[in-house]
Amino acid sequence: MNLLFLMTDQHRVDTLGCYGNPHVATPHLDRLAATGTRFDRCYTPTAICTPARASLLTGQAPFRHRLLANYERNVGYLEDLRDDAFTFSGALAEQDYQLGLIGKWHGGTHRNAASYGFDGPDLPGWHNPVDHPDYLAYLEERGLPPYRISDHVRGTTPNGNPGNLLAARLHQPVEATFEHYLATRAIEQLEKYAADGRPFFLATHFFGPHLPYLLPDAYYDMYDPELVELPASIAETFEGKPPVQRNYSAHWTFDTIPIEVTRKLIAVYWGYVTLVDEQIGRILTRLDELGLSDDTSVFFTADHGEFTGAHRLHDKGPAMYEDIYRIPGIVRIPGAEPQVRDELVTLTDCTATILDLAGCDPEQAVDSRSLVPLVRGEHPDWAPDLVAEFHGHHFPYPQRMLREDRYKLVVNPESVNELYDLQQDPDELHNRYTHPEFQTVRRRMLRRLYDLLRERGDNFYHWMTPMYDIGASDYDASLSSFEPEGAT
């Protein structure tokens, strides 16, 4: 079984036609969803690039693989996986798979994709490396103009400085964009693997639609801002919420940007999604032309979502809202009937799925579960909830989340905890954690999260033991054994 893995960065679910957007043109991903399994409730294990990608590579939760932050703003954590870390690429190599990864790596500072056996140009960093020699050679070979942008969109930071670049016009034709370049290189690699004849795993990791949104005019102006329905959570007041969220809103300069510009930014983001969809379409079309579709399982997902103004935020950060934790998840296995599934699944589950399809032991991905039975229409017992975590970006900030069918619990040790009723409050504007009518839900979820963390070996539970209503402790919470067993 060949494996084609398509991945975007910082991609909102609600920008895709197959997930209900009536305006954004995503015909190629919509076709993939219509011929495969669309997971309606797919989540990232952590809404930040490097840790999420490390979880995909290893099949481990972030606390276990310990690559907990993006290296550009590392806050003292590991910057590469440990030498003995399991990776799915190692397992596939033992099965004589050809391994390719075209695009964003962002998985460490000293080791690159080649360190884990992947073919492809080494493209480090968090955003399109437009000064990379291979990209420059691609432009020169085709007589295409170099990268140049204008009309920068920025807000103003609390100290009066210009904020992070959010968008700009790119003065290149679509053929010169980094996205087109990546798809071209992926197609070349696909052709090479097809000629070899051995099974392959080929990943294409687009850097977009991560901000800043740098697009040619045709995509920058593709969508009328009047089509944009602003997120209801733009009404966020941060009352009863962790103060860090208000700080992040100021960092991302939301209140210094006119609302008309916010609407335009969302429209530009939509244009970015369409640009990426077109490049994915080129890869899928070539897969068909090479006669490989009947022997190739195809994945599409993202490392995490993006705020684009929701909750008066941009980018991502220490706020465990659906906007950045829910991600697209599409899997097409030859012979499986098209369907939509509503089980709670994660990006990390892709790891066991890859192993399963390649004939490897999926149990090696210890925090992952194969999606193959779900894609094949079976109905196995499936966990009714999932855990996500966050460890910091700019500064250490530990969080744990429990997501159920209706409710979400977020534990913030330095601040107030959060509880959202996603049925009554899908925009997560009202923190119900302290409300008396939610006491039963709160206690049940705190205990469930506590038990799950203990089962996983996530020592975050030690903070919960004395601080929250999780019942009587059944161990020495001081970890000191000052008193003999049975003493009171």
Image (tube, rainbow, N blue to C red):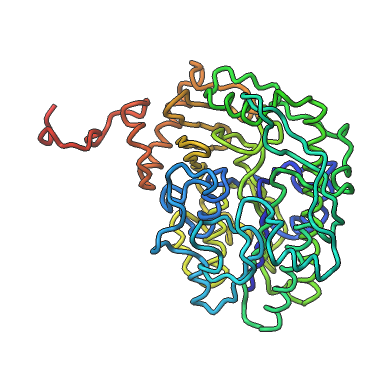
Q: In screen coordinates, is 21 left or right of 309? A: right
Count the numbered circles shown.
0
Q: Quadrant of residue 177?
A: bottom right
Q: What residue is drawn where x is 80% and y is 43%?
A: 270
Where residue 256 appears, as percent x and y from the top left, is 72, 24
Residue 479, compared with residue 374, is above or below; it is above
Q: In screen coordinates, is 456 left or right of 207? A: left
Q: What residue is drawn where x is 67% and y is 78%?
A: 193
Residue extending furthest bottom? 196
Image quadrant occupied by the N terminus: bottom right
Q: Quadrant of residue 306?
A: top right
Where residue 212 appears, as percent x and y from the top left, is 72, 43
Residue 426, compared with residue 167, is above or below; it is above
Q: In screen coordinates, is 256 left or right of 366? A: right
Q: Quadrant of residue 481?
A: top left
Q: Could you say which is closer to the camera, residue 223 or residue 327?
A: 223
Where residue 430 appears, as percent x and y from the top left, is 60, 21
Q: What residue is drawn where x is 58% and y is 49%?
A: 49
Q: In screen coordinates, is 288 left or right of 424? A: right
Q: What residue is drawn where x is 82% and y is 39%?
A: 151
Where residue 74 appears, as percent x and y from the top left, is 49, 44
Image quadrant occupied by the C terminus: top left
Q: Could you say which is closer to the camera, residue 159 or residue 22?
A: 159
Residue 353, compared with residue 409, is above or below; it is below
